[in-house]
Image (tube, rainbow, N blue to C red):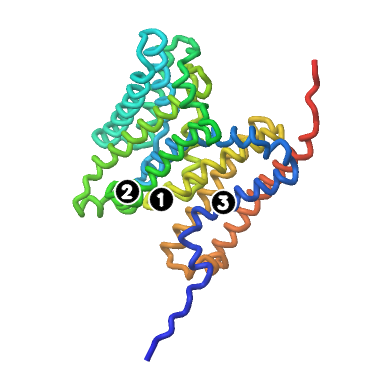
Amino acid sequence: MTTQTHPQPLTERLEPYIAIIGPMVMILAILLFMGAVEPARYFRTSNLNLILLDAALYMPMAMAMTFVITQRGIDLSIGSIAALSGIIMAFMIKQYGFSVYVAVPIAIMLGAVMGLINGLIITRFNVPDLIGTLAMDLVYRGFALVLAKGLVLARFPDFLTDIGRGQIPGFVPIPVLIGTATMIGGYLLLTRSYFGRYTIAIGSNPEAAELTGISVNRHKVFAYVLMGAAAALAGVMLTGKLNAIQATSAPYFNLHVIAAVVVGGTSLFGGRASMIGSFAGVLLLSMMINALVTLRIEFFWQSVASGAVIVGSVALYTWMQKKDRDGAGGIMAALQSPGGQKMLRFSALLIGTLIALFAIGGLTAGDTLPSG
């Protein structure tokens, strides 16, 4: 006698991939909208290259931030780490005659040391991640301001500019290779190593992870060391991209990276991670900001759009986690509940706001700026 197995409904099969489906749908929506409004400008090769270069800058940090957030942490100091590492590297090259091949690794190691300091402050002195990294953001930025004294350090060797904006002839830009390599490495680390398993276990339940023999504090420190090194690498890439660095560089790195990771499905409450989702989140934000620039929408409205995406993503994934805890019967059943209906209305409001913002830009895209 054979037992018949009924195939799973489509909604149940798609549930594990919601984290990646969300940003991919938004990416497709941007492509369709820009294809209808500004296809010539948005889809030209030079603009697509700009999108990739912008996304590549955030990929190393998004990779490391995925681990930090998954274990219920946060790091608000990455912009200052990037700036301070870049400043020190620039002084080593410009003022002290260090080879760029020596200065770059030292800068990345200094970033790892700053990440180590963050981790020790959080674990040894029991300072909350948010407060500890926010305070260290001020400290690192202050050191950068003291060292630079208002100077803009510029004109670096070709090796450094290649890291930031170089391109292998007939192939993708070098920064894209670097960023993609870090994301692939992070994916393997998350899915194929004890480090990734411990990260998810700690984020799900730190007390239970401690009882199973995982050194929670030591693991947290390792994640912050990785975060510091990735931020320093981003600082090196930014210096090469601009061929210059100053103490006030990278002011919004933290918000951009956290947004990309959260949009990609990594839970701010820990225990849920998606490295592929973080990769898609980085691409989504770079494409969205580039689209707003293409439509000549002011920088302040770009911030409004980014904030709306963050709020919507956090609300969605928070609701999804509550649905998991309550044991609702799949996505469709949860959507039919009162909470699901509220989430649908809220999502429709945010999507409508973004569409209106893009539409305003599309209607005014043909306007020319006054000359003079």
Q: CA distance from mark 2 to mark 3?
A: 24 Å
Left or right of 312 on screen, residue 224: left
Which amino acid type corresponds to the residue marked 1 in the rendered image?
A: Ala
Residue identifier under label 1: 273
Q: Are marks 1 and 3 in contact (CB under 8 Å)?
A: no
Q: Residues within 10 Å of mark 2 (few under 14, many from 20)?
A: many
Residue identifier under label 3: 24
Q: Are marks 2 and 1 in contact (CB under 8 Å)?
A: yes
Q: CA distance from mark 1 to mark 3?
A: 16 Å
Q: Earlier in the sequence, mark 2 or mark 3?
A: 3
Q: Where in the figure is residue 3, as x and y percent of width and height?
A: 40, 86
Which amino acid type corresponds to the residue marked 2 in the rendered image?
A: Gly
Q: Where in the figure is residue 318, as x and y percent of width and height?
A: 47, 53
Image-quadrant location for residue 144:
top left
Q: In terms of secondary structure, where does tag 1 sit?
A: loop
**Which residue reaches farthest bottom?**
1
Q: Nearer the viewer, mark 1 or mark 3?
A: 3
Quadrant the N terminus occupies: bottom left
Image-quadrant location for residue 325:
bottom left
Q: Residue at 72%, 41% (x, y): give it.
A: 39
Q: Earlier in the sequence, mark 1 or mark 3?
A: 3
Q: 89 and 365: which one is in front?
A: 89
> Looking at the image, can residue 143 be seen?
no
> Looking at the image, can residue 350 be seen?
yes
Residue identifier under label 2: 196
Q: Residue at 44%, 25% (x, y): give it.
A: 235
Q: Residue at 80%, 18% (x, y): give it.
A: 371
